[in-house]
Amino acid sequence: MSPPAATEPVRASHPRRLTLLRALGALVGVALAGVTAVRGGAPGFLERGLYDQAVSRLLPEVPRSADLVLVEVDDRALAALGERWPLSRATWARAFRALAAQRPAAVAVDIIFDQPGSRDALELGEDVLEALRASGLAEQPAGAALAADLEAKLHARDGDARLAEALSEGGGVILGAAALTDDVPAMTPLDDDGALGTPLSLAGTTPRLQARSMAGSIAPLRMAARGSGTLNMLVDGDGVIRRYPYVVDVGGRTWPSLALATALYLMPERAESLMALAATDEGAPLMRLPSPDWMPRVSLADVLHADPGSVGLDLALRGKTVFVGVTAMGLHGQSTLPGQVAVPGVEIHAFALDNLRSYRLLRSSGLVAGAGVLETAVVLLAFALLGRRARTLGGVLWAALSLGLVHLALVGWLAADVGWVLPLLPAWAGLGLMLAVDAVARGEELGRQRDALRRLFVRYPQGASGSLAAPVPPEPPPGSGQ
Amino acid sequence: MKRAAAWMMVLGLVAPPALAADTGEPCGGVRFEGGRIVTGRPLAPKGPETEACLQHVAAALQARPAIRSVTLAARLPDAERLDGQGIAVAKAAAEVLVAAGVPRTRVSAVAPPAVPGEPGQLQLAYVERPAQPAVARVRAASGDVSAGPAQAELRPRTMGDALYTGELLLTGPGAHAELVLADGSTVRVLADSLVRLGTLELMANLRRKVQLELLKGTVETRVAAGGDGSVFEVRTRGAVAGVRGTQFRFTAQEDGVTRLETLEGRVGFIAKKGDLDVVGGYGSRALPEGPPEPPRPLLVAPTMVDPRDGTFPVAPRLTWASVSGARRYRVEVARTADFAAGVRTYEARGAELEVPDLGEGKWFWRVLAVDADGFVGFPSKIFAFDVRP
């Protein structure tokens, strides 16, 4: 009755092979989680789409802002001003002066004034003035009046100087700057390392965004403003912006982004905690998404043309943090957020400031990435144990589904409530592989049992249903010669 | 006053560009750095020392005609800025500059808030006439690489340096430079070459106009894709290579012979007495005052034999398979696989070479066959080896 001796080693090696294959499946899952951790944390390459859908549809949206306002250079503003982009410095000076009159808490500018304004007309005027004085005409009353008038007009038309004055009147204007990386269009780098002020002190953090140099607004404007912050974004390979770089490293010095520089200005008493938070995930944490029309908007046309005493303008701007940027068609860079939400870049800075000050950042690297690997390993280990106890394939399938759902719930809860983004797919991939191994093994085992039964039934064939009680003569042993 | 100004002019011209005055005078030194006027010691908002320093700054400003305007900031604590006191201090300081000869139309005053905890001080910034934009940057350089507006004004250049229209770039013996042009094209300037950067205009729809002048030596160019109507030309004394393709070498010999080797695509070769298109895999040359010769096939890439990998205590003997028609071989050894850094070039008559004194570390090598007329063929595959004594 015992099976042939030659089949014994096969049976003995089968459980070992099964265990090895299961372990390999689990290892693939843990390795995927490890790769995700090493590459900066979730979402990994394959789960970006899933992450985008989850973060844009399932996670709670950032509530509508009460004290952040976007002053936009929109199509209406351009039409009302009768100017083409870029606006003249004189217009910008008027705009910042009008904003200063509304006494906002801070003005963050998503624009870099990296080149001086045109001075051709000024230089012509200066030549005329000099000639007037050299001719002696300026010593006569009419000539003196003409020279004074010309001097006043030249003074008024010096856009850079007037803009510097307007920025200093504003009190809390943070200008844009650019960290020059390979994908940033060529700008003239600032010669002086300290041209943007004092670098941040973030010991132990190596920012994700590394640049070779910095570019910023011209020196008089930087001097008149409260500070500068970088406007760079971290764009993933698929063109989506998931992380906001709060800090950038340039030759070992760390500089703040526009959002962080504005936050530090607004909340100096929270400087330490803000910088610690900004250093999350190598200075570029994942962002939570805003709701549609999250930020109130005011057209620059209204700021310039409304009565300075306008109650509406006062309500819209007084004490608020104002972000100034371009939204006119074709002039602003549409940045794509997860879930294919395209917004002007200036909104992302505002949104990053809101994330920072309300501690809404999502973390996925460092400790969280390690936790992700551990959680994946625990899920797969639990499945290995449950799978061994399960008597049927249905039981194994049930265990896999349960653990997969528990894993999904845990990952979702951590992201929504704690702000930890753990990898989702590696554990599922491991579960899938282990399940497949189990299914194949159990299928083979069933096949073997079926073959054994068949052999048994062939050896002891049953009669027709009516003759079940009749004894069946045993099948002669093989090789008996019958 | 005029005499003093003239003396200041002379001082300004003699002084190094960033240091406009010595450290012995009222400001403790004045430097013009990236749009900021930096004084040797902090400038108090007012007082006789401040006034003396501002007069000195005014003289330095007048010696710099490129400076078009100066902004003076009085950074005072909030308590001292009340009721317009801050701007009054700034305007008083501006008046000192005006009285010292800076045109009033070029001086402005602002009063931004001070950094909390810091004492009040005066700061100055200036705007210069916009500098001309860089047309290229040095992406890699090894050996003696220098550039300047004229041969007498060449100064050493290194990785990251900007180059401007009209500048000359010179590579010494054994030297090599790789330039990235503003349109994204790359130009490798081989040893003993002299190139003048001519026009570089970038227009809408990727249209561009690039003109380089090869005065001697060889350039190897990889041209970025351009829009319709784009022009990319390399000129020598006797010929012009107008790019319709992507990769080519262009050589201007001392005897006036111009040689073109097209590795990819198609290049228009225009000499004084005729022109032709040279497609990938072919080369042509033009003698002085002569038409371009009919295209000839370039030599194939040598097949590398040894070493293809491995670690050696000293530089190994490099061997490769002979190429039919090759008179000699150009062997390039470099620190990086793109042959941009630490490039050394050797000549070999046969199909092997003992490389002298290679340093420790990883080295990449490749070989190019050269025919009797100096036409350089396709480069071989690149292999690497390590030297660990």
Image (cartoon, coloured by chain):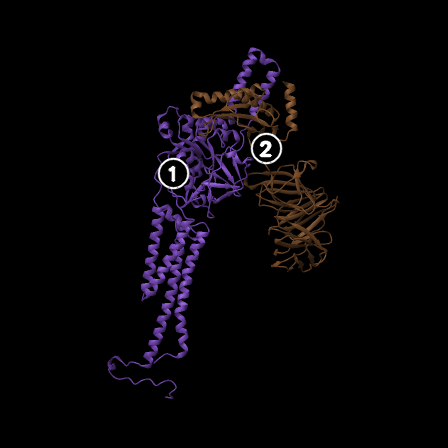
Q: Subunit of mark 1? A: A
Q: Can I make out residue B51 in this image?
A: yes
Q: Disc 1 marks which residue? A: A357
**Residue B245 horizontal side relative to residue A359, left or right:** right
Residue B3 in the image: x percent, y percent? 65, 19
Dot 2 amino acid type: Ala
Image quadrant of residue A120?
A: top right
Image quadrant of residue B326?
A: bottom right
Q: Colour of chain A?
A: purple
Q: Can I make out residue B129 in this image?
A: no
Q: Nearer the viewer, mark 1 or mark 2?
A: 1
Placement of the C terminus of chain B among the 4 image quadrants: bottom right
**Residue A322 horizontal side relative to residue A115, left or right:** left
**In the picture shown, does residue B239 fall above or below A312?**
below
Residue located at (35% from left, 34% from top): A66
Question: Which is more toward the observer, B363 or B139?
Answer: B363
Mark 1, Cα crowd under 10 Å, few <14 / some 14-19 / many 20+, is many
Mark 2, Cα crowd under 10 Å, few <14 / some 14-19 / many 20+, is few
Residue A299 in the image: x percent, y percent? 41, 31
Q: Disc 2 marks which residue? A: B131
**Residue B363 horizontal side relative to residue A363, left or right:** right
Give me the chain that's brown. B
Residue located at (59% from left, 32% from top): B131
Question: Which is more toward the observer, A375 or B152?
Answer: A375
Question: Which is more toward the observer, B50 or B319?
Answer: B50
Placement of the N terminus of chain B among the 4 image quadrants: top right
Residue B174 in the image: x percent, y percent? 68, 47
**In the picture shown, does residue A297 fall above or below A377?**
above
Residue A130 in the image: x percent, y percent? 60, 19
Instruction: Give yes or no for contact between labels 1 and 2 (Cβ–Cβ under 8 Å).
Output: no
